Image: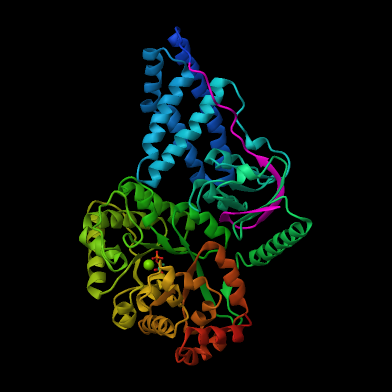
Amino acid sequence: MAILKGIAASNGVAIAKAYTLETPDLSFETKKVDDVSTEVNRLHDALTVSKSELEKIKENARLSLGDEHAEIFSAHLLVLSDPELITPMEEKIKNENVNAEKALDDVATMFIDMFKGMDNEYMRERAADIQDVTKRVMAHLLNVTFPDPALIDEEVVIIAEDLTPSDTAQLNKQFVKGFTTNIGGRTSHSAIMARSLEIPAVVGTKTVTEDVSEGDIVIVDGIDGKVIINPTEEELASYEEKQADFEKQKEIWAQLKDEPTLTKDGELVELVANIGTPDDVVGVLNNGGEGVGLYRTEFLYMGNSDFPTEDEQFEAYSSVLKQMGDKPVVVRTLDIGGDKELSYLDLPKEMNPFLGFRAIRLCLERDDIFRTQLRALLRASVHGNLKIMFPMIATLDEFRSAKALLLEEKDNLIAEGVKVSDDIEVGIMVEIPSTAVIARQFAKEVDFFSIGTNDLIQYTLAADRMNEQVSYLYQPYHPAILTLVNNVIEAAHAEGKWAGMCGEMAGDSIAIPILLGLGLDEFSMSATSILPARTQIKDLSKEELRSYKDELLSMSTADEVEAFIREKTNQ
Ligand code: PEP
Ligand code: MG
């Protein structure tokens, strides 16, 4: 038995025989050719067959995964028709009298190297697209069979160096129980698709293809990010139990998917999700999310080689709004800076980036960037229930300036004859202590608050959220945090507004009873935390939790708070 550690990319436990997805030997001989036109035709034939295969894969992906994922193959199909790639290949054959294999390889390698060397994740992904497509074309030129996961007809766990999007789209959930790869991270395409398919997956194991042989029994533990190869009887039994427990648990959770979130004493609570891309919406709906409480739009900027255009942003925001129907969608405007950088935006090096030129500070200074986003949001507003929220607000002036720009762009659009919703709530994230302290003054002007505890905790306890050495100070249950949170909720309610929370604390099983007792209206968390939270809330009495409020707020330490809640809620 061997155990490998990797990155838990998709929840669940899979146990099955290993199926190694090996790319066939694609090595070729460089040949001199005299009949260049036949060679150019060979290239075009291989491109045409590859294209029709990819059309089929794209259609399968559309049916099993939806339009959003199928779009990846549009990118692949574009590669196959891109004259910037095809023309140099043809010219190479004609001018250098080389065979199609050599021309394909040389030109593709040049583009792949160029994109791979770029300091930008989006362009590096384009390199992966070209690599993926080139292999398929090469296999046709060499007349060898390209692996086709769609042909698998027994239960397996797929083992691969990496899974290309086209591999992933062909996986048949009936037989493919899970997969594990050498490379990749939580945001790689294969990981994103695994979560959409709800197939357990562990990526980034570094060596799984070397450690596993065809036919070995493999356990993919997508809960804890482990891969167990040829487990002992005992290991197998214990993982079968873990698998059964998880499945049972999921069934119990799923019963509440379409239920409202009600406490034991009948109070309604709103459970919504945090997302980073339009693709994440599927998971929100599958997990019974009642809306989106935080759409972190910076991923749209980070996954790009330049600022996304107004139209690109409009597409992304509209897609989320349309998919969510009349459910609320809170979109946060650009929160760049701190630990989040843009390769194409030269920000000054700072001593304290988390206290520096970031988020709304940057947007107010660079209002060209900000206005583009606001226009895209306003245009998308007619497609759903949009709420806009500004990050890192420290003063009322910042909020007023940001809102003024929003209203200005709204007027501009209306003057241009563009339809804009008249019903957009405008709120702020409360993640800076100054704002939490004078929440009462803010509450008169904003439509809602969303408490960003990830930052609020670091600023209140002066403990960098990225620094391991001071992580002991990162205390969500610290009475100072509870006091600030309570202040924000009371301020909102005094002005007839609502208060939510989109920091990680909102999905924490110790924090949930505290927040319910303080009267938090909306809890925003990762999609897979929603059903466990709904299950927990069903057994809690809001009235009882409310009665603990004064006692909790007068406690002296986080440990005291935690011990008290554990005892009262049997955790
Ligand atoms: C927060 O600070 O709590 C938050 C939700 O924002 P982010 O984690 O993106 O900084
Ligand atoms: Mg934050």
Which residue lies at the image location 32% right of the left edge and 74% below the top edge? 446
Image: magenta residue range: 1-30
| Figure check: 428 above or below 563 | above
Q: Position of residue 321 (x, y in %)?
A: 43, 56
Q: Residue at x 61, y 64 (%)?
A: 257
- For the residue pair 28 and 120, the one nearer the viewer reads as 28
Q: Quadrant of the C terminus?
A: bottom right
- Which quarter of the rendered image does ligand 1 occupy? bottom left
Q: Is residue 434 left or right of residue 137?
A: left
- How many numbered marks appear? 0
Q: Residue furthest top?
A: 34
Q: Position of residue 430 (x, y in %)?
A: 36, 74
The answer to whether residue 365 is above or below residue 398 is above
Q: Choose top left, top right, bottom left or bottom right for residue 449.
A: bottom left
Q: Residue at x 49, y 89 (%)?
A: 552
* Relative to 251, 119 lies left or right: left
Instruction: State the image coordinates of residue 150 (x, y, percent, origin top left).
Output: 64, 37
Q: Is residue 382 magenta?
A: no
Examine the rendered structure and indicate whether residue 516 appears above or below residue 90.
below
Image side of residue 568 versus residue 521, left or right:
right
Residue appearing at x 73%, y 53% in the figure: 231
Reply yes or no: does residue 23 show up in magenta: yes
Residue 458 appears anywhere in the view: yes
Q: Nearer the viewer, residue 468 or 508?
A: 468
The percent position of residue 441, horizontal first and vertical second, equals 28, 81
Q: Colour mode?
A: rainbow
